[in-house]
Each structure stands twice: as structure tokens, then as C-alpha cells.
Amino acid sequence: MDGIHDLGGMHGFGAVAIGEDDYVFRHEWQRRSFGLAQALAGTTPFCADMHRHKIELIRPVDYLTMDYFEKWMIATSELLKDAGLVNESELRTGRKEFDVDLARHPPARPDALVEAMKRGAELKFGDEVAAPGFVVGEAVRVRCDAPAGHTRVPRYVRGRLGQVVADHGVFQFADTVARGEGASPQHCYAVAFTADALWGGDAESASDLLYLDLAEAYLDRV
Amino acid sequence: MPTEKTPPDAGSLHHERGHDAYSHRHDHDPVEEGAALRVRALEELMVAKGLVDPEALDSVVEYYERQTGPRNGAAVVARAWTDPTFKEWLLEDGTAAIHSMGFKGYQGEHMRVVENTAGVHNVIVCTLCSCYPWTVLGLPPAWYKGSAYRSRVVREPRSVLREFGLELAPDIRVQVWDSTAELRYMVLPQRPAGTGKLSAAELALLVTRDGMIGTALL
């Protein structure tokens, strides 16, 4: 979606708060928000692309001012609501109003949760699952599609010319995964863009390169 | 379709966890307090419903705070500096080489390592959210997730790097890697001069998190 989360290339955000913001967690509640998202991902269940999209749906003014882990907490809460596991009133008060089916939503146990994190997610498919539409070295143009849902094409490369520099193989497709419509496995490519192709005369150095990993469906042959 | 995470099996927990961490906070920022209250409400609700085992939260946070972090990446870098065969493998198949050292898991399932040389400087970002190689660098610092870094490093990497104290000559090519899919990136920094006699373990101590993000030289 064309939301505020798609920050790449925007002006106006000032200096990076290098020293001030050189921390992972500053408050205990940030740790709890992070842990809640991880503990609930297998139980609810939701996946990273769904969680990301819920963050994208936060009002732009709030997106820019809220703490990162506050946004995580909101995304987690929204996914729980969608799954019918909580209601708005419960979230407001913190008090339980109805029970859920724990046989269908078993809580993550400590060891098993850490093991799941160490195992990671299944994101990739065998090469035989989908044929590649592009070859390394080929020039491509990023499609101009402007979907309202979750997508992994930043606006700053939309419609721009690049070159395929690597074929990473067959991966799940974030757009459909985030909608709960399945993996739509397809090739994902590293595509290189020159700074000149993206920023024209305002590039700091025309021949600097930007690399993005883009799914087959995002690209057109030139 | 593969799931993001396998639903965890039932296990057991036996020790009590205190919930008093919140009561010791002394700051009074209303925004922070609002978020803190809402997170606490969510956690208490989840525990009351039986959907969350609070000890599982402790475990996962502790895992990322204490058991993973940039020292994992530093071990990878130091090995690459001292073992040419490993370095070749790392640059060719970062996933397999890094997984072979046991650094495997969520947000590190698929890895690509990009090498800094005399003529090329690499830097990583995620403009759309905050994708980061958790398995080798731990969780990202706040600035990496912030609007300024994400908006600017793709458009004016040299200016951003200057703020970090890196002045890159015009003939050095800057390569910015925007993590837009499932691969996670790590920079292989240049080995500092005069370190020829150091062991891999000693070299690892020289490798910083920012060096592996690409916002510092070593």
C-alpha cells in the first residue's frame, strides 16, 4: 500500500539519531511487546507479512510518532481481533470477557518457542515449483502496480529500470501471504538500480548502486 | 503453504516470574506510559486466556538479548578473514556458510553477505519496515528502524554515512542493499591493517555491529 511506512527516498526526516537511538530495548514494556508478538505468532497463528501489514495500516500521524514496539503491540492486537481471540473491550481493560479454545490455540512453551525461533520459518520452495521468467543480466522494469494491500515494492523503484543480478530461487510471495491467500511461490531476484536511474540529477553519485530483492510478479521485461 | 512458525509443542514451566518490572519505572513520559499500560493489559489478557505463557516471553527475549547478537556475526567475519576457503563459501552461499556455524533461525533463514573492498562500500537497510539479520546481528538498534535512516540511506547514503563518521572518497562505489524480500544482508567489512598476527578470536573482538551494517569502518 502507498502508506507512510514506505519511507525510502523521502525528504524531511533530519539527522539519524545515532547516539540517542543506539539501543534495542529502552523499556521493559518494549521487551514484553516483542515477546508477545513472537509467543503469539505460532498460537494465533499469523506470519510476519500479516504483522507488517497491520503496522502499515496504523494512521500515518501515529506511525511517525509511536514507538516501534507500540506499533508491534497494535499489530499483534489487531491480528488477535481478526482471529476472534479478543475483543476491543478486553484490549481496553485488560480483563477477560470470554474463553478461547486452547486446543486450537495452544500457548507456546518456553523451550519450544526458542526452538521455533532457532529453526526459523519455511519461506523457500524447490526450483522445480516455478519456472524463472528472467535471467541474470536481463534488464527489467518494475511494474507500476499500486496495490492497496501489503506489497514489497517501495515506491522509489516503481516504474524504474534495473538489471537482474541474481536469481535467489523460489520464495513465497508477500502480497498473497499477507492476505492469507497462500504462498504463490515464484522466483525472487536481486535487481540493481543505479542511483542515477532512481534520483536523476539529484543522485549523490550517479554510479552508486541500489539493490532490491523483487518477486517475479513485480517485474516486466523491457 | 509453509507456515511462518510451527506451533510450539506443549512443554513445562516451573519457576515463577515476577511482574514487578513495570512498578520500578521512574520516567513519566505520557506516551511511553500509555504504551506500557496497553502492553501490560495485552499481556495480562493473553495470560488470563491461557494463550501466552509469560515464561515463554522471558525466554524469547532473553534468547535475543543474551544468546544472539553481533558477536555471532563477528565470529563469521573473523573466520572469513582468516580462512580463504570459508570466505569464498560465505560470499557464494552466505546461507549455508553461516548456518554451518550454528547461526540459524528466524530472520536469518536466507542470508547474503556483501564484501567491502578498497573500491566498494556496502550498507544495509530495510526501507519498508526493519528487516535485519537477527541470527548474526541480534535485534536492530532503534535508529535502524527510524524514519531518518530508512528514508535517507537509499537517496543520500554518503551523507548518512558521513553522520556516522565515514567520509567515502568519490571513487569508492556505494552499494545500498534494501531488504525487501526474505533475504537478510550482512556486510563483510575490510580487515583492519596491522592485524596479521591476530587469531580469529582476537579479530572477532574488532568487529562491530555497525561495521556489519555498513555504517562504520573497522
Image: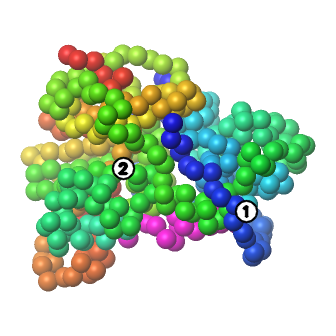
Regarding residue B26, the answer to whether it shows in the image is no
Q: Distance between the residues labelled 2 and 1?
A: 30 Å
Residue A139, magenta (yes or no): no
Query: Mostly what secondary structure, the magenta segment?
Result: helix
Dividing the picture into quadrants, the one containing residue A54 is: top right
Extent of the magenta region: B55-71
> What kind of element bears circle 2?
strand
Return the residue at label 2: B110
Q: What residue type is labelled 1?
A: Pro
Going by the image, does A84 lie left or right of A31?
right
The colour mode here is: rainbow
Regarding residue A207, the answer to whether it shows in the image is yes
Dividing the picture into quadrants, the one containing residue A78 is: top right
Q: Mark 2 lies on which chain?
A: B
Q: In this view, does A218 lie above or below A69?
A: above
x%, y% of residue B36? 72, 54
Q: Residue at x 50, y 41 (%)?
A: B2
Foreground residue among B102 and B207: B102
Residue B54: image tag: 1
Upstream in sequence: badge 2 or badge 1: 1
x%, y% of residue B203? 24, 76
- In the displayed image of the protein, which residue is found farthest to the right? A97
Label 1 neighbour load within 10 Å: few <14, some 14-19, many 20+: many
Label 2 neighbour load within 10 Å: few <14, some 14-19, many 20+: many
Residue B170: image tag: none
Q: Which chain carries label 1?
A: B
- In the displayed image of the protein, which residue is found farthest to the front? A128
Residue B65, magenta (yes or no): yes
Foreground residue among A79 and B9: B9
Q: Locate the C terminus of chain A by quadrant.
A: top left
Q: Residue at x 17, y 73 (%)?
A: B82
Q: Which amino acid does label 2 sit on?
A: His
